[in-house]
Each structure stands twice: as structure tokens, then as C-alpha cells.
């Protein structure tokens, strides 16, 4: 973050006025002299760079808080604009989301360094800036023309060098305001995201170049013929992209085997077809799918902007809208993933913002259900889609809907599954989201796991709500701050919930791992167990028999897994918490087996097992009466 050295009064709608000492989060400094920032109230605009200094005392949490306020103000500014996000709104929102993600990544890296006990040398103190002669310098206007101009000289400073181009958009000021089956199928995700394919190695590439050098012009292989062939099969057969790819590969392999003279040509085309670069091939730009996506997104945007439709509640267009949404789902399932990603990325993910607004405005249940399915399909395209939706008002809207419409079973199930998808990456939520995603919301989920709605005759809600709780818990790095742990501690009955957790542990499943997006979040079940057993209060949700089953699983994992396996380390750490915060000393289940595992690990020579040895050393030191160190030979 940065701190203001002097007062500044803006004379332009794109700039911010501020007082000395006010803090800012930097968003963009591509202009050398006017920096785009968000202040601690959420306003976004430009400030002269030479009025600021680096604030070394700022913590990551302060930065995140400032960015979250900025995101909230962008949404409110759009609502005040009739629910429409301008190009400037979208651009600012994308900068805020990107900066937020980068800050959270740095925060995670710092946490890992702290966990590894790496000492970071303190930074030398900076000398205090010289006091200005005048606390309120003359405030030049940041011109709105297209001509470039300089930032104003700070007090006691000379004239600043080069110039910048002023933008015509005003800064964003703080607003003045006082089927489940189909959704469940999405959890397989092979239809929504790129499947890792065979990628040609550098050796293969060099061989291809050598082959091409020997060929006559008649055997030259066009650069995009692989993607063109897949597109032809897809358009003419209406099968999915992946099946089209398999069909083309099968035909090319057959030709290669049966026509020796074409062997090299077929091999080159096969490399294109099997390459991951096929997903972003230029031939996809003008494909039928890309053209249809453009039409569908345009039509949905028009529906969103049709205020008359929203006011009169006309139903004549419902079938047309549902047809568009059904076709959109089909394209997301079957088209080349790169084509879908490119269409969604246009104008800083404008289609996502439009669809979120439309979901808010649309009250017809069939259309809302179709939109929920579309959001689920979009989540599998890339992590940036999830980040954009997480920072939108959609999570709050879904949480509110779930609590207000419990008897609307299908919408309840779809909403729970979509929220799980949005939360499954563990990306921290904007702070204002916790107004609806609160401890009370978690208690609502726990209550309906124990007593499902009467209309849920197949009892699917408890499993969906369980997964949602596990995904939501990924957002809290400290169990003491976890709303999930607080809700569990205050709940009088979590019997069904604890039994379902034990079933997941026994199967080794992580129902929250839905995508292969990077970075991959921790195992949600193991993290939940680690958080639960970090306190004597929450560890009491498991009965003694459950505890013994859990210890049996820990013994199996510790015995079978090799040094350096993160799962083994997590199970050892989990057992340490169990011994510390439960009455393990009363039954000492599998004590001898565990001690033998500890001794075997201590004898391992691999360096990868050092973390495991450290945990075992802590267990021996903390509980010598149960696990005596003297047994080590």
C-alpha cells in the first residue's frame, strides 16, 4: 500500500481528492505520473504519483480490505447506473480482482514460509519525508482531453518529467446509500474443461522440422489443418469436441497404417490433433460454435437490458430464452474449450457480469434453474471465471435464495452445488460477502443436514450441504476465525454430519475437488478434520467409535505412503491434534502399531521425510507417557 504525503484536491472527475496520511492500494502505474488506485473507502481513481510514499507497515489484510471495498463500490456504481456495467466498470473490476488474487497468492506464500520457519530479515527503517512548505499545494486539473500532461509537482519538488494521457471516464466514488442430475454430472467436468492431451516434445518438434525440410512443396502440412479437421467433424456430425478429436485421430491412424507414402504427413497432422495447442488454434475463431456463442450472449444481454420485460413480467419469451440457454449449455459441454474461453473473456468478462445481473432480475423459476446450470458449466472453463463470479454478488444472491426458498427443492439443490463450485478453489471471499455467508448461514446448512426438507424424499440435500460446508471451510486459514468451526461449536446436534464426514474419510474421497485448476487447494476433508481437532470444543462432535475408525485409517495411510507424500504428513499432523485435544489416553487405540510406524519413519534415510520426523518428535516430546522416545533404536 501507499500513504499520502500531502493533501490533494482534485479538479477532474477521474482523479481522487485526499488528505495527508490517507492510504491507497495501487492498481495500475502504466502511466509514469498518474497512478490508478483504490483508497481505504473503496473509491477508485487517479492520483499524482509524487504525492505518495510506500507504506511499509501495511498488512496483507489491509490491502485485501481496501480491494474488497473497491469491488463493492464498482458493483454499487453499476447498480446506480441502472444495473449496467460500463466498459470502465469492467476494466476497473478486472484490475481489482487480478490484484486481489495476486495479493492472496503472496499471502499464501508468506504463510508457507512461516510454516517452514524461514526467518525473513526485517527491512531497514525509511527516513521520514521532509515536511512540505505548504500543506495544501495548488491542485491542478487532471485534464479530460486526449492530450498528455504531467502530474502536479509535489511540495518542495521540481517540475515532473514526461506526461500522460488523461482518461475521460470518471473515478468510481463511494455510493450514497443508507435437474440435479445434470448439475451432478458436471462434477465429472470432462465436458467443461480441457483434458490434458499429448503434447509434442521438443525432440518431436525438431524431427518434424527435419522432415518438412526434406519434403516437396506438395506435401507441406498447413499449420491449422488439425483443428480444421476436428471442427469439420464437430459441425457435420454435431458430436462433442472430444469425440470429434477421437474420430479424426482414428481415421488418421488408419490412413497412416494403410498408406505408407502418407505416413509422415499423417504423423504431423496427428501431432496437431493431439496437441493441447489445438484448443487455442486460430481456426476456432470463426467456428460455428464461436458464432453461436456471440449470438447467444448478445441476445441474453438484450434480455437483461429489456426493462419493459422485467416490469411487465411477460412470459411470451420464456421458451425462446430457455432455448438459448439450452444451446449455450450444449456448446459448453461439446465445443472446443478454447473457443468457449475466448468468447467469455471478451471485454473483461462482460458476459459474466451481464448474466449475474440477469439472474438477479429474472424471477421465473425455469429460467433461473437454466442460468444456474450455465454458471456451473462456465466454472470449468478457467479459474478466472470462478474468481470473477466469486467477487460478484452471485454468492450472496445464492445464499439468500437458499435460506428464503427451502421448499423450492430443485433451486435449493442447484444453488448449493453452484456455491460449492465457486468455493472449491479456496479463494478468499470479499469481506462484504460475509453479511449473507455468515455463521448463521452455516448453521442453516447444518440444521438441514440433520433434518432435510420434507420435499427431499431422496435425501440429496444433506450430501450437497455437506460438500458446501467443506468448500466454504477452505477459505479460513485459522480455525479460530472459521465461521464453520464457530457454527459447529454452537450446534447442539451434528450427528448425521459427523457420520457423513467419516464415510468420506473411509472412502478417501474429496467431493470438493471438482476442477483441475491451478493452484490446487488442499484436500477439503483433511483440512476440515485438522480444523475440528485443533480445539477440544469442536473435536467432541465425533464419538469414540468414530475416533477409532479414524485412527485405523491414519495407521493405514502412515504405513502405506512413502516419504515426502503430503497425505502422510497431513495424517501424522492430524493424529498429533487428536492426541492433544481428545481423551485418546483413555483407550490408546492402535498405540503399539502407531509407535512401530513412528520408529520406521525415523529410520528412513530419505530427506523427503524430514517433516514427518519433526511431527513424530513433537508427539514423543508432548506425550512421553503414551509414546516413549526410549523405544527408538
Image (cartoon, helix red, strand yellow):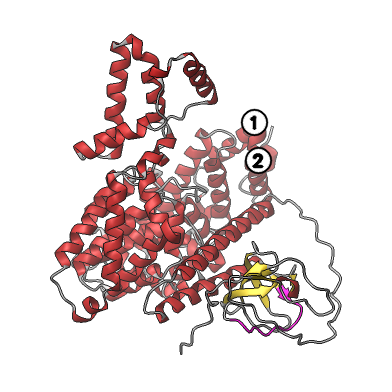
Q: Position of residue 122 (x, y in %)?
A: 80, 60
- Quadrant in which the N terminus appears: bottom right
Structural crowding at the residue carrying mark 1, measured as other residues with C-alpha within 10 Å and reported as few (<14), some (14–19) or many (≥20): some
* Residue at image point 51% right, 24% down: 205
Q: How far across and down, in percent of the image, does residue 559 sit?
A: 52, 35
Marker disc for residue 624: none
Q: Residue at x 28, y 64 (%)?
A: 300
Magenta residue span: 3-12
Q: Does residue 276 appear in the picture of this structure? A: yes
Query: Which quadrant is the C terminus positioned in?
Result: top right
State the residue in front, 3 or 114: 3
Residue that sits furthest to the bottom in the current view: 178
Residue hosting label 1 = 604
- Examine the image and state in which quarter residue 479 appears: bottom right
Q: Is residue 189 above or below residue 90?
A: above
Q: With 4 as the anchor, is 583 left or right in this view?
A: left
Check the image and report above or below for 289 versus 9.
above
Tag 2's secondary structure? helix
| Residue 137 colored in magenta in the image | no
Vertical position of residue 64 compared to residue 597: above or below:
below
Q: Position of residue 4 (x, y in %)?
A: 72, 77
Is label 1 in contact with label 2 (beta carbons under 8 Å)?
yes
The image position of residue 363, as x and y in percent, is: 23, 74
Q: Which residue is mark 2?
A: 613
Between 231 and 373, the residue placed more toward the observer is 231
Amino acid at each position: 500500500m501507499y500513504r499520502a504525503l500531502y493533501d490533494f484536491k482534485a479538479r477532474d472527475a477521474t482523479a481522487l481528492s485526499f488528505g495527508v496520511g490517507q492510504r491507497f492500494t495501487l492498481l495500475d502505474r502504466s502511466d509514469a505520473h498518474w497512478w490508478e488506485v483504490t483508497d481505504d473507502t473503496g473509491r477508485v481513481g487517479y492520483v499524482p504519483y509524487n504525492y505518495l510514499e510506500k507504506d511499509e507497515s501495511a498488512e496483507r489484510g489491509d490491502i485485501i480490505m481496501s480491494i474488497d471495498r473497491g469491488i463493492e463500490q464498482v458493483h454499487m456504481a453499476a447498480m446506480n447506473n441502472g444495473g449496467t456495467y460500463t466498459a470502465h466498470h469492467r476494466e476497473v473490476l478486472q484490475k481489482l480482482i487480478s490484484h486481489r488474487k495476486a495479493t492472496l497468492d503472496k499471502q499464501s506464500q508468506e504463510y508457507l514460509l512461516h510454516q517452514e520457519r524461514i526467518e525473513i530479515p526485517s527491512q531497514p527503517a525509511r527516513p521520514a519525508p521532509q515536511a512540505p512548505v505548504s500543506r495544501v499545494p495548488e491542485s491542478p486539473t487532471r485534464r479530460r482531453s486526449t492530450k498528455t500532461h504531467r502530474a502536479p509537482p509535489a511540495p518542495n519538488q521540481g517540475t515532473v518529467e514526461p506526461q500522460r494521457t488523461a482518461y475521460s471516464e470518471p473515478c468510481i466514488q463511494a455510493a450514497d446509500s443508507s435437474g440435479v442430475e445434470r448439475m451432478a454430472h458436471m462434477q465429472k467436468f470432462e465436458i467443461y474443461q480441457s483434458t490434458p492431451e499429448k503434447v509434442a516434445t521438443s525432440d518431436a518438434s525438431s524431427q518434424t522440422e527435419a522432415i518438412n525440410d526434406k519434403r516437396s512443396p506438395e506435401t507441406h502440412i498447413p499449420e491449422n489443418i488439425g483443428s480444421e479437421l476436428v471442427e469439420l467433424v464437430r459441425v457435420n456430425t454435431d458430436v462433442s469436441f472430444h469425440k470429434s478429436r477421437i474420430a479424426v485421430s482414428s481415421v488418421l491412424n488408419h490412413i497412416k497404417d494403410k498408406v505408407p507414402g502418407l505416413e509422415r504427413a499423417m504423423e504431423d497432422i496427428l501431432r496437431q490433433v493431439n496437441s493441447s495447442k489445438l484448443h487455442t488454434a486460430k481456426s476456432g475463431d470463426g467456428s460455428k460454435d464461436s458464432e453461436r456463442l456471440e449470438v447467444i450472449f448478445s441476445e441474453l444481454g438484450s434480455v437483461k437490458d429489456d426493462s419493459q420485460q422485467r416490469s411487465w413480467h411477460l412470459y411470451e419469451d420464456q421458451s425462446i430464452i430457455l432455448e438459448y440457454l439450452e444451446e449455450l449449455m450444449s456448446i459448453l459441454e461439446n465445443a472446443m474449450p478454447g473457443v468457449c474461453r475466448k468468447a467469455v473473456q471478451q471485454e473483461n468478462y462482460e458476459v459474466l457480469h451481464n448474466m449475474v445481473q440477469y439472474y438477479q432480475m429474472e424471477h421465473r423459476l425455469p429460467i433461473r434453474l437454466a442460468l444456474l446450470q450455465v454458471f456451473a458449466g462456465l466454472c470449468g472453463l478457467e479459474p478466472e471465471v470462478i474468481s470473477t463470479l466469486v467477487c460478484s454478488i452471485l454468492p450472496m444472491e445464492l445464499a439468500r435464495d437458499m435460506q428464503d426458498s427451502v421448499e423450492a427443492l430443485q433451486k435449493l439443490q442447484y444453488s448449493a452445488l453452484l456455491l460449492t463450485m465457486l468455493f472449491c478453489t479456496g479463494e478468499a471471499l470479499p469481506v462484504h460477502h460475509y453479511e449473507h455467508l455468515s455463521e448463521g448461514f452455516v448453521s442453516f446448512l447444518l440444521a438441514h443436514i440433520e433434518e432435510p426438507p420434507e420435499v427431499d424424499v431422496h435425501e440429496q440435500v444433506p450430501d450437497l450441504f455437506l460438500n458446501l460446508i467443506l468448500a466454504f471451510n477452505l477459505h479460513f486459514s485459522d480455525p479460530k476465525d472459521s465461521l464453520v468451526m464457530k457454527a459447529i461449536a454452537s450446534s447442539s446436534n451434528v450427528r448425521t454430519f459427523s457420520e457423513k464426514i467419516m464415510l468420506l474419510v473411509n472412502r478417501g474421497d474429496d467431493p470438493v475437488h471438482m476442477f483441475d485448476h491451478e493452484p490446487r487447494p488442499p484436500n477439503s476433508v483433511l483440512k476440515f478434520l485438522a480444523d475440528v481437532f485443533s480445539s477440544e470444543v469442536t473435536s467432541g462432535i465425533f464419538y469414540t467409535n468414530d475416533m477409532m475408525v479414524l485412527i485405523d485409517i491414519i495407521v493405514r495411510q502412515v504405513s502405506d505412503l512413502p516419504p515426502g507424500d503430503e497425505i502422510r504428513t497431513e495424517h501424522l499432523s492430524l493424529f498429533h491434534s487428536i492426541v492433544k485435544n481428545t481423551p485418546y489416553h483413555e483407550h490408546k487405540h492402535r498405540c503399539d502399531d502407531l509407535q512401530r510406524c513412528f520408529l520406521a519413519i525415523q529410520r528412513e534415510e530419505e530427506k523427503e521425510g524430514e517433516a514427518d520426523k519433526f511431527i513424530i518428535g513433537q508427539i514423543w516430546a508432548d506425550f512421553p507417557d503414551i509414546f516413549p522416545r526410549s523405544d527408538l533404536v
